[in-house]
């Protein structure tokens, strides 16, 4: 019995020790879909956005037929809601961009404090019904804790 406890304990503690390093590496990219439009959100530096600091943000949109959607082909708006679902950012300037060789929509987001937010991408492409995609985002404290 004791020969199983030590390896199990070690594995559990090892997982807890590396978890903070794994989550931020994955958190920069999230996927959402709605009917005919899919989107992926990317934050600068492949990390969760830092509170109080501008974060370059890109959205890769595709229609269900895997056709990329550029800003020119989408009447898109981006807003940010806080944990109470109140709009805190809206009417953000958008620009055309590329990511991974594909058309992207870019903007800059600044989350006021650390915590949970929802980034909302809404609009309509030339061949889709109006859509609204929601991305849960956690802004992290900009100051290192070590």
Image (cartoon, rainbow, N blue to C red):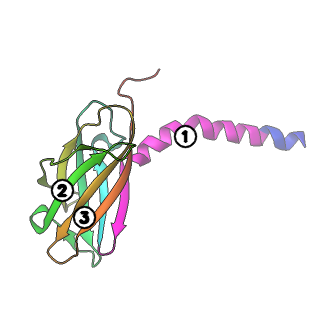
Label 2 crowd (10 A; few <14 / some 14-19 / many >=20): some
Residue 76 point in image, percent of width and height: 17, 60
**What secondary structure is the stretch in magenta mostly built from?**
helix
**Is residue 22 rendered to the left or right of residue 49?**
right
Residue 28 point in image, percent of width and height: 36, 47
**Is residue 76 rendered to the left or right of residue 85?**
left
> Circle 1 sits on which residue?
19
| Of the two numbered discs 1 and 3 in the rendering, the one whose residue sits closer to the viewer | 3
Q: Where 87 sits versus 72, above or below?
A: above
> Circle 3 sits on which residue?
61
In terms of sequence position, does the residue under pointer 2 or pointer 3 come before the other?
A: 3
Residue at image location 31% in from the left, 61% down from the top: 133
| Of the two numbered discs 2 and 3 in the rendering, the one whose residue sits closer to the viewer | 2
- Distance from label 1 to label 3 (Cα)? 30 Å
Q: How many marks?
A: 3
**Is residue 121 rendered to the left or right of residue 70?**
right
In terms of sequence position, does the residue under pointer 1 or pointer 3 come before the other?
A: 1
Q: Which mark is residue 77?
A: 2
Residue at image location 72% in from the left, 37% down from the top: 10
Q: Where 126 sits versus 30, above or below?
A: below
The residue range painted magenta reads 7-36
- Distance from label 2 to label 3 (Cα)? 13 Å
SS class, disc 1: helix
């Amino acid at each position: 019995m004791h020969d199983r406890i030590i390896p199990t304990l070690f594995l559990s503690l090892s997982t807890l020790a590396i978890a903070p390093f794994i989550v931020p590496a994955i958190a920069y990219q999230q996927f959402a879909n709605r009917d005919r439009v899919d989107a992926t959100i990317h934050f600068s530096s492949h990390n969760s956005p830092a509170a109080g600091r501008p974060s370059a943000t890109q959205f890769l949109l595709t229609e269900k037929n895997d056709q990329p959607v550029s800003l020119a082909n989408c009447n898109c708006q981006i807003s940010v809601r806080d944990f109470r679902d109140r709009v805190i950012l809206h009417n953000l300037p958008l620009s055309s961009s590329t990511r991974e060789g594909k058309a992207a929509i870019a903007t800059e987001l600044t989350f006021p404090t650390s915590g949970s937010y929802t980034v909302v991408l809404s609009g309509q492409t030339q061949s889709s019904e109006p859509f609204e995609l929601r991305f849960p985002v956690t802004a992290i404290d900009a100051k290192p804790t070590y």
